[in-house]
Amino acid sequence: MTRTTLAAVEPPGQRAEEGYAELFAAHFPRMVRLAALLGADDPEDIAQEAFVRLHGRNATLRDPDAAIAYLRATVVNLSRSRLRHLKVVRRHAEVPQFNEDVASAEHDVVRRESARELVAALGQLSARHREALVLRYWMDLTEWEMAEAMGVSKGTVKSHVSRALDALSAQLEGTR
Amino acid sequence: MSDLETRLRNDLKAAADDVTIHGDAWQQNQHRIRAASVRRRTRLLSVRSAAAAAAIAVIAVAISLPAGQTESPQPAKSPSVTPSPTSTSFVTRVKADERSLPSGRVASLYVSLSYSDDGPQAAPRMCDETSIATVDNRTGEASRGCGSPERGADSTAVAIDYLNASDWAGGRSLSGGVDERVSSLTVYYSGAGGARTLQLHDLADAVRGFGVLDPDDNDVKPQRLVARGDQGEVLQAIDLVDRFGDDWLPQHDACTDDLLPDGHVAVYPSRDKAKTADVAVWLGTTNARVSIRYSFDDVVEICIERLKPGAIAGAYGGAAVAVSASSAVQPGVVVPVLAPEVASVTVEDQGRTRRWATSAVEGSPWQVVIAPIDASDRAAEVTVTAFDEAGNELQRATVEELVTSGS
């Protein structure tokens, strides 16, 4: 990935604001979904916070690749902090809400049930393991991009993914 | 790719597709950015000289409420709460409570601090928002309100810096913020509702927010709020009936109602077994009945008509044992009614001090102590002192100061 980080710190002008708006439209839903899959109880709040922090970083905002990487890392960090906080108060694991009242074909019902079971199992993994699986299998990030988002080395990413798959497999076995 | 990896891809996609995103996300984002901008300016101003600061105009923030969200109805029971002004930005919003409703919908209570355009020195306001939504978050409604800091919030006597009561479609909510000295915040419920320690959520400016939903169909209601420090010392207690009025709780009258839960009963220890008496205490919402049943079946009823909001809510002091005309001294009893944060009391009579542990009264958050004294005619002079679990004195008063009325 090519990255250009400009040293000059200037107030974001009209162009930067337009770029920010485009970035928001294109990536806000994805960042909400990322926070939700990572187990955050208020994913929109986390995505909003990540975008507000990005807005304050004029230099990062000028490079779309850097901005997206920054957003991913911030959402991962905020979700992890939120989960740590929730451990104290949460009585039972919450999973992203599923839409129940839409009439579904049988295939859809099976798919939703499978997804629900998998997300519940993900919720039992450590934050790092969950991050590794979501970034790899839902976001399709490269190991380098995952390392950047998780704040770990590339080698650590590999071992996280491998161990997370084992842990997830064991969780799913345990629910049967 | 393994089966598990294939499943991961498919199921994560399915789960992600089901996450709902609100339509006003961009407006919310712009609100937050403006609020952050005001806060940055405020911090900058605070380090400049007063003269320079006075010369700098603070850019006003004019933000309208997000489209599709309704303005809060005026909270009926909290005079300090007003509908949120359109010039307010919501920041650091956290979910403080959540309840599943009988309708199948979910009520969520959010609290946030908001900074208005009243200038850099203006204290932030505490806002609460209750949203009721279907489980899938597809449809819903919200009510919202904001309140100013409590009077004296900057003083050490006040630890609960914000306290709002709001109405929403399915009940009421209680929310607010505490200062950094508070380690735990407990809400005591009316009736047999017990107590609940509330989660404190970090907000800005060293304020931690809290909130509790109080659905209409709940039999028990929040009655008292107690903030404690890290040693268990009571920093502040708020009687919610005193604060929000008698309508805050459904009234149960201990002095006139016949159908009361079991009262607290103690056998009065008399040296003369023929003259023993059962001293019983029943607690109502805001009053108490002390009943003295003598061994020869005579009964005296005393009503403490109005419990006070302090740690010692009321007291009876007087005779508890019928004595023959030949007795020179009539023994007595002192019955202080105590708030739930009281751990023990001392009863000081004629220079002699005895410490008593408190006893809970079933079906009530209040507690009592039944303390015999040597002479009933001195009851009014007896001094009662209440202590918290850290041993700190909460209140000290003579029975005369505490007594409201006899029967």
Image (spheres, coloured by chain):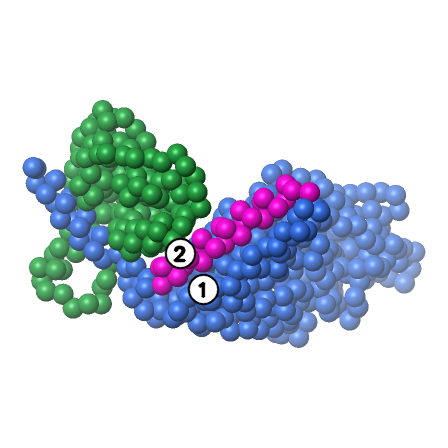
Chain colours: A green, B blue
Asked whether, in this view, residue B368 is left or right of residue A3, the answer is right
User: Which residue matches tag 1?
Assistant: B130
Along the viewing direction, whichever of A3 and B199 lies nearer the viewer: A3
Give the amino acid at mark 2: Asn
Q: Residues within 10 Å of mark 2 (few under 14, many from 20)?
A: some
The span picked out in magenta is B24-49
Q: Which mark is residue B29?
A: 2
Where B206 sits versus B187, above or below? above
Q: Residues within 10 Å of mark 1 (few under 14, many from 20)?
A: many
Where A54 sits versus B275, above or below? above
Residue at the image position 71 percent from the left and 47 percent from the top? B51
Along the viewing direction, whichever of A31 and A102 lies nearer the viewer: A31
Q: Position of residue B203 (x, y in %)?
A: 51, 48
Q: Position of residue B90 (x, y in %)?
A: 49, 57
Callout 1: chain? B
Residue B21 in view in this figure: yes
Asked whether, in this view, residue A172 is left or right of residue B380, the answer is left
Q: Position of residue B64 (x, y in %)?
A: 47, 67
Secondary structure beneath label 1: strand
Looking at the rendering, which quadrant does residue B75 occupy?
bottom right
Residue B274 in view in this figure: no
